[in-house]
Amino acid sequence: MKNRINQLKEEWDSREKRLGQTKRAVLFKRFPAWLNNHIHKQHVRFVLENIPQHANQLLDVGCGYGRISKEIKSHHLQLSFTGIELCTEFAAAYEKEIGSCFNGAIQDFQADRHYDVIIIVTLLMYLDGEERQAIINKLWSILAPGGMMICIEPAIEFLNLWRRLTRTQFASPTGGSVYHFSMPELQGLFAADAENTMSVHLLPLLRSTALHHGVAVSKPIELL
Ligand SMILES: C[S@@+](CC[C@H](N)C(=O)[O-])C[C@H]1O[C@@H](n2cnc3c(N)ncnc32)[C@H](O)[C@@H]1O
């Protein structure tokens, strides 16, 4: 596992050097800027819609340079931000502009508090099945009762469409081999039903062009 994390860190450090702290670096490097901007706006809208009013502490897991946290910060001045990020330069940018950032892997992160909001945007796609569930369970355990977990990951629909169009069995729209989810599969990772879901489509409402799926899951307040 350590080798895989080290390799991923090297890839992200080098990607940051090539593409900088840009949407292209953390979304689709082959897509035009207008399309990455469109995807970004839909991510931000979904995240903002689902932040509980009472929230104080936010954890952004695999935060990148803070693409999403930065937008949240401009709307929710009361929130304290913590990031977790492998790439050294991204973590430094997050620390400088948004909040404290653990420069390491989520697998090694030790929480010292509970969070009211945990966001995970295109991070689970790097984990294999068992690890993915273990990470979600770990994050669920540090989500405060009444808190919200918001997760957005690549959709299987666009991967399938891409493979049909390019007539290749193993090609992927990102060029790498990351995991793609169906909506039920993404929902099934969580210990409670989703309060809200969304999909980002390349062509509006055409299901086969879904690029990303998002879920927002609230942790029930346990009654004594
Ligand atoms: C596709 S980018 C998304 C960044 C950010 N969430 C966003 O949407 O703008 C994935 C990020 O997750 C980070 N990452 C990947 N695996 C990680 C891990 N195991 N622990 C912490 N960060 C990780 C990468 O360094 C990269 O910055």
Image: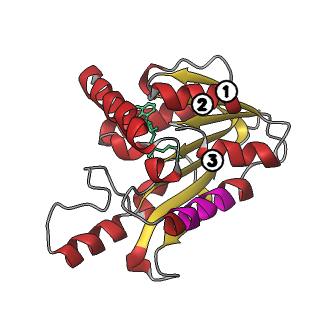
| Residue nearest the observer in this picture, 32 or 8 | 32
Query: In the rendering, which numbered label is found on residue 93?
Result: 2
- Looking at the rendered structure, the secondary structure element under dot 2 is helix
The percent position of residue 100, horizontal first and vertical second, equals 66, 23
Kindly indicate the quadrant of the structure image that contains residue 60.
top right
Look at 73% across and 59% down and name the residue there: 49
Q: Quadrant of the C terminus?
A: top right
Q: Which mark is residue 68?
A: 3
Disc with the residue nearer the chain's start (3 vs 2): 3
Contact (Cβ within 8 Å) of mark 2 with mark 1: yes
Q: Amino acid at mark 3?
A: Ile
Q: Which residues are magenta?
A: 36-46
Hey, what amino acid is under mark 2? Ala
- Judging by the rendered image, the residue that carries numbered circle 1 is 96
| Up-down relation of residue 223 to residue 104 (above or below) | below
Q: Amino acid at mark 1?
A: Lys
Q: Which image quadrant for residue 44?
A: bottom right
Q: Residues within 10 Å of mark 3 (few under 14, many from 20)?
A: some
In the rendered image, residue 48, in percent from the top left (x then y), is placed at 72, 55
Q: Quadrant of residue 82?
A: top right
Q: Main secondary structure of the magenta part?
A: helix
Dot 3 lies on which element?
helix
Q: Is mark 3 within 8 Å of ligand 1?
A: yes
CA gap, disc 3 and disc 1 = 15 Å
Viewer-side label of 3, 1: 1
Q: Is residue 148 visible?
A: no
Q: CA distance from mark 3 to mark 2?
A: 13 Å
Tell me the residue at 56%/57% (across/down): 215
| 73 horizontally vs 186: left or right | right
